[in-house]
Image (cartoon, grey):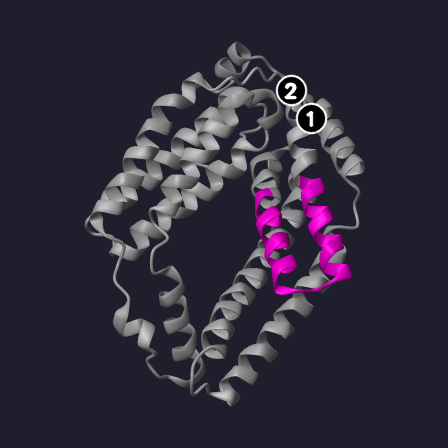
Amino acid sequence: MPFHLIKREPIAPGLRRIAREQIIIGLEDSADTSIPGNRGVHSLRIRCKKLRGLLRLPQPLMGDTFAIEDRRIRRAAKQLAQNRDSQVIARLIASFDGSTPEPAREQQPVSRQDVEASRRILTNCLEAVDDWPLDLHGFYDIAPGFARTYRKCLSAWQKVMVLPSDQNFHRLRKWGKYHWYHIRILERLNKPVLRKRRKRLRKLQLTLGDAHDLVLLQSYLGVREHADEQLLRQVTERKNQLYEMAVSNGRKLFRTPANELVANLSRCWAEQGELNVNNWGQSQAPE
């Protein structure tokens, strides 16, 4: 179940296939009792993020449907977010000094009721996928959505360059993740080049994700009556190191203007040739 368009796969059927597969994976993982509870919930949350990223490719052509689907997928993810921060804080403090913070004793797993509520929302989404208004015939139809997301990325990057605050880095993480998902979906258009970009974007996400977790821990320690000042300094120092790594990576990623990146992908699409749905289906048939 690849999270990318297969070579020569028409865009509309391909996006529907990817969306259906992601929802099914999330539903199966969250229903599998052999998978530890947190991992099943995590899988469901990841599918929600990927779906929201995917929807931003055809967004300009989807009209009100985009807002409806994005809103309910976001609601499904929100059902699963309880106690995540306390779990992150517990894990991080243990990684620094091996102690067990108060949140670790207080945290509770996401209730089965909330998991089932999220699953019901995604089941409804699955039923709606075939009705999404995806009148897409080539890369030029999703280029506006791709460009819009990448421009949000570039805007977030510029804000980081002006003011490298936690808030601005978090915004870069958000839009960088959606751009990463788009590159993953389109990677087969130019695998050697886009694979390199995809790997850099993944590295950026891991770096900024770790930094965001440290922001949570920093905030938690900062409001405690008897804060561990040494630990707080260690956390702040490590967070700043991660930000420096993210900036170094971002200088390579975000030096390409949106128009240039879109033009490059358009050429790749034209060079690989566009097949209609029937021809593509025949080309996938076993010999």
Residue at left 43%, top 40%?
74
Residue under pointer 1:
269
**Which amino acid is tagged 2?**
Gly
Question: Is 80 located above or below residue 65 in the figure?
Answer: below
Q: Nearer the viewer, residue 149 or 265?
A: 149
Q: Position of residue 119 (x, y in %)?
A: 29, 38
Examine the image and state in which quarter residue 120 appears.
Answer: top left
Instruction: Name the side, left or right, on which 34 lies relative to 287.
Output: left
Q: Position of residue 175 (x, y in %)?
A: 61, 47
Q: Which residues are magenta?
A: 150-178
Examine the image and state in which quarter residue 167 appears.
Answer: bottom right
Does the rendering let one see residue 190? no
Q: Position of residue 158 (x, y in %)?
A: 76, 53
Residue at left 58%, top 63%?
207
Majority SS type along the magenta span: helix
Residue under pointer 2:
138
**Which amino acid is tagged 1?**
Trp
Q: Nearer the viewer, residue 102 or 264?
A: 102
Q: Local crowd at mark 1 within 10 Å, few (<14), some, or many (≥20)?
A: many
Q: Is residue 232 magenta?
A: no
* Element under disc 1: helix
